[in-house]
Image (cartoon, rainbow, N blue to C red):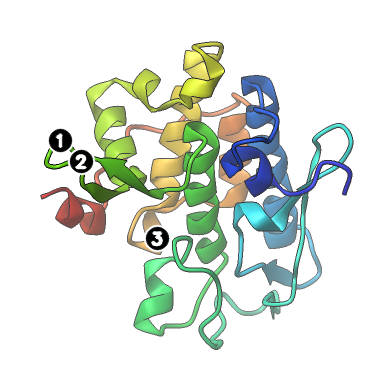
Amino acid sequence: MENGSLDAHLFQSKATVLNWTTRYNLATGVARGLSYLHHSCKEYIIHCDIKPENILLDASFTPKIADFGMAAFVGRNFSRVLTTFRGTIGYLAPEWISGVAITPKVDVYSFGMVLLEILSGKRNSHKVCTDDNNSNQVAFFPVTAISKLLEGDVQSLVDPELNGDFSLEEAERLCKVACWCIQDNEVNRPTMSEVVRVLEGLHNFDMPPMPRLLAALAV
């Protein structure tokens, strides 16, 4: 694809910085693609490895979901499928670890993690310098994101490379969607069709609760 993969633009220092409109359109485009896979195919398709490396960008930065090598196909008469562990650490829903049969909600979780990286412009797990002897600690951005969302301070979460040139309303909407998508319990996560409606401004979500696993990390 002409513009490579999303991870190159978000995480590589020499890459072109994606402006806010492009980021928001990317998020909405990926949501539409996943909604199609989950709701419009003859057999619904669970991608199982949604991450920035698997989102390719064409000449106009329209996103294309790539690499279906790990995908699971589920008949319409079934709600979930038992499959082998697959995916990428950092984007895996908790149910992968527990070994239960999965649903399309594993993609929803991964999509939420990707949304947070689109928002911040950096990996969700990254090193930060502390004041103690200039040592580095690993910060987990989702903990910060939902805490700041609940405090009403989404502005501080947005990629500083944008120099403040973004829509705060859209940033809050994107962050809220992401924090619903990464809920521990799959039942509490929205469907991708619901996500599309929210990102398109046709619906709204209430404030999400702090996921139990993230709350444990925040202590």
Residue that appears at 24% across and 35% down: 147
Dot 3 or dot 2: first in sequence order is: 2
Query: Of the numbered discs in the image, which one, if any, rests on residue 131?
Result: 1
Q: As drawn, is 105 to the left or to the right of 47? A: left
Question: Could you give the CA–CA distance between mark 3 and mark 2, rounded to whole angstroms?
Answer: 42 Å
Which one is in front in this view, the residue at disc 3 or the one at disc 2?
A: 2
Q: Of helix, strand and loop, which one carries label 2?
A: loop
The residue type indicated by label 3 comes to Val
Q: Are marks 3 and 2 in contact (CB under 8 Å)?
A: no
The residue type indicated by label 2 comes to Asn
- For label 2, the crowd category at 10 Å Cα-Cα, with few meaning under 14, some 14 to 19 and many 20 or more, is few
Image quadrant assignment for residue 21: top right
Q: As drawn, is 183 to the left or to the right of 211? A: right
Query: Of the numbered discs in the image, which one, if any, rests on residue 89?
Result: none
Q: Is residue 195 above or below residue 200?
A: below
The residue type indicated by label 1 comes to Asp
Question: Could you give the CA–CA distance between mark 1 and mark 2, rounded to whole angstroms?
Answer: 5 Å
Dot 3 or dot 1: first in sequence order is: 1
Q: As drawn, is 185 to the left or to the right of 83? A: left
Q: Is residue 209 above or below residue 49?
A: above
Image quadrant assignment for residue 77: bottom right
Q: Nearer the viewer, residue 68 or 100?
A: 68
Q: Are marks 1 and 2 in contact (CB under 8 Å)?
A: yes
Residue that appears at 28% across and 38% down: 144
Q: Are marks 3 and 1 in contact (CB under 8 Å)?
A: no
Query: Of the numbered discs in the image, which one, if any, rests on residue 134?
Result: 2
- For label 3, the crowd category at 10 Å Cα-Cα, with few meaning under 14, some 14 to 19 and many 20 or more, is few
Q: Which residue is mark 3?
A: 187
Residue 173 percent location from the top left of the image:
48, 27
Residue 171 percent location from the top left of the image:
49, 24
Residue 218 percent location from the top left of the image:
17, 48
Which one is in front in this view, the residue at disc 3 or the one at disc 1?
A: 1
